[in-house]
Image: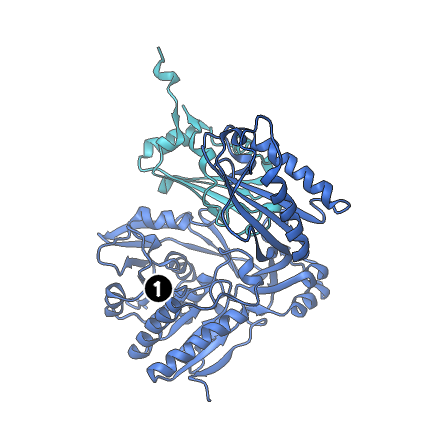
Chain colours: A cyan, B blue
Amino acid sequence: MKSSKDHKTKLHELVTVLRSKNAGPFLTTFDLFFDDKKLYQRVKNSGVLSKALISRLYKLNEQEVEGIYFVDSVKGIKITIAKPANMTSGDSHCRDLFGAQQHPPLMDIEIP
Amino acid sequence: MNSKTLKILSTATYGFGIGGDAWERGMGWSPDAIVAQGTTSDGGPAYLGTDNPSGASMMIKEDLTTILLSAKQKNIPFILSCGSPAGSNVELERALDIVNEIAQKNEIHLRVAVIPGELEKDYVIDKIRSGTPIRRLANNDALLEFLSEEEVSRSKRIVAQMGPEPIMAALDLDVDGVITGRSLDVGLYMALPLKMGFDKALAAHMGKTSECSSLICEPQSYDPVFATLAEDHFLVRPTNESARCTVNSVVSHNFYERSDPVREENPGGILDTSHAVYEQYDSETVKISGSQWIPVSPYTLKIEGVSHVGYRTICVCGVRDPILINCIDGFLGETRKAVEKRMSPLVAGRDYELIFRVYGKDGVLGDVEPVIQTMSHELGIIIEAVAADEARADSVCQIAVDYMAHMGYPGRLATAANVAFAYSPREHRLGSVYRYNIWHLLELEDPCEPFNIQVRDFPKEQ
């Protein structure tokens, strides 16, 4: 039987918004918003959203994770990553002109 | 200055469709000016590279008609960026042709301060030669850390995101309004407030909040928004009666397309919204205060430029056979080898690119796709070649297409052909591929130096 301590939830179950978009042609930015302050704090305090995790999910070096921002006043989290050099907006290997469908790897992140 | 306010009706010039009840409602609130942006890098580098933009649409003409006639009727200035989407000179001139048609058709006279946003390559090269460091704005290996003369020469076209200063100079002239090519969206909004002595941080934040119209509202739409700027705050509300601005909807949009949620580099300073206070003023209006402007020296402008990568030829096909779907990676690997063999001594990656976009598997996420084994019963595949000339791109694509059509794979039963081609002809030239090779900061002593303000009358003399 699972104890409540073991209960993990996937990130997409906790948010009201989870999206990706270009921040200019060279960066992809992810926004997460929460309605409930407790859920926001749970994700923030878990420490799960780290440069190590993001770089692993998106196959980057940690330096290519530009920033992970927690904005308490609006219960929002922003993560910005560099695009691969041959995959900048509109370049021949670009798969997603707006960068708007790059968020799925974040959705199943488990949060304790 | 206590009760001084400035009211801005904010919309866009992309041709999203802006007239109707919401527009009338907004105009009914007696705005002091209409501000609208219509240039962006969102559409990617091809729009800046092309010499033959797809042509300003009927929708842009309708929307510009709405804006210009309303402004003229109420004798209020309009401040617009036009030339959607990239704001190059060729696109700007097409938009100005539309302005001319509107003036003729409606029998009105418009005197417009036109400020093109394109930079001559020689101008940028001279800056480099005089020792001005032009540093990249994004840390990405696709960009030279400092712009070189060779990279500028290699570029096709360069535009700059002008700040509010050239627009302020233009507003000093006896004109009905200002139309720029590529410009900084926020700069369009800052110009009039700065001339009138309003707080710079609030003016910038008001611009950032208003520039995407009703994407800051719930529900989202393309209707205009209405901002009222005061001494120590600004208000923002929708013009659409069934929409509202909420603290959530406004803040969520402040994150949109920004690399940093609270700090934004602008010409001459940083807009810092980390201490901004957002309040629900009434059921549809949000009040914002506490924005900060941190002056930065030297003054810098963001410049954007593209270079030509090559030409693209594609083929669109589907795969429905489950045995092939199951071994598609290996099959595409063999296709690649066949292309490399036939194209030799030309080398993949150096002399041409062969790209497979496999929708239903990893077309969107590529190697970042967490789903390892596709469960799709069908795949959509774009076979794509990019090369320095069209004939070579055609050849690469055709070799891949011929291999994929008929060559075998383990366990194959369907030996007639492997793919469902969508079209005849099978291969299609998609034209030029560009990439952004310039995304840098140009230091300036005079914010107006690169820009040339032209006063033009519409309709033009025949």
Q: Secondary structure at mark 1?
A: strand
Apparent side of residue A11 relative to residue B228 in the rendered image (left or right): right
Q: Across the whole image, how many numbered discs are drawn on residues?
A: 1
Question: Which quadrant of the figure has residue B160?
Answer: bottom right
The chain containing the residue under callout 1 comes to B
Disc 1 marks a residue whose amino acid type is Ser
User: Who is closer to the viewer here, B442 or B57?
Assistant: B57
Apparent side of residue A24 relative to residue B238 in the rendered image (left or right): right
Q: Would you place residue B103 above or below residue B386 in this image?
A: below
Identify residue for label 1.
B10
Across and down, in percent, residue A9 comes to 38, 25
Q: Would you place residue A76 above or below residue A11 in this image?
A: below
Across and down, in percent, residue B275 comes to 40, 48
- Farthest residue, direction top: A1
User: Who is closer to the viewer here, B384 or B158?
Assistant: B384
Question: Which quadrant of the figure has residue B65?
Answer: bottom left
Apparent side of residue A55 relative to residue B353 in the rendered image (left or right): left
Q: Residue at (49%, 46%) from the top-left corner?
A: A99
Task: Please indicate, yes or no, whether residue B133 appears anywhere in the rendered image.
Answer: yes
- Farthest residue, direction right: B345
User: Who is closer to the viewer here, B177 or B66?
Assistant: B66
Across and down, in percent, residue B427 comes to 57, 52
- Farthest residue, direction front: B416
Quadrant where the N terminus of chain B is found in the figure: bottom left
Q: Residue at (69%, 59%) from the top-left corner?
A: B151
Question: Which quadrant of the figure has residue B188?
Answer: bottom left
Task: Please indicate, yes or no, whether residue B143 appears anywhere in the rendered image.
Answer: no
Q: Would you place residue B424 above or below residue B109 in this image?
A: above
Label 1 Cα neighbours within 10 Å, binned few <14 / some 14-19 / many ≥20: many
Across and down, in percent, residue B210 comes to 37, 59
User: Who is closer to the viewer here, B116 or A99?
Assistant: A99
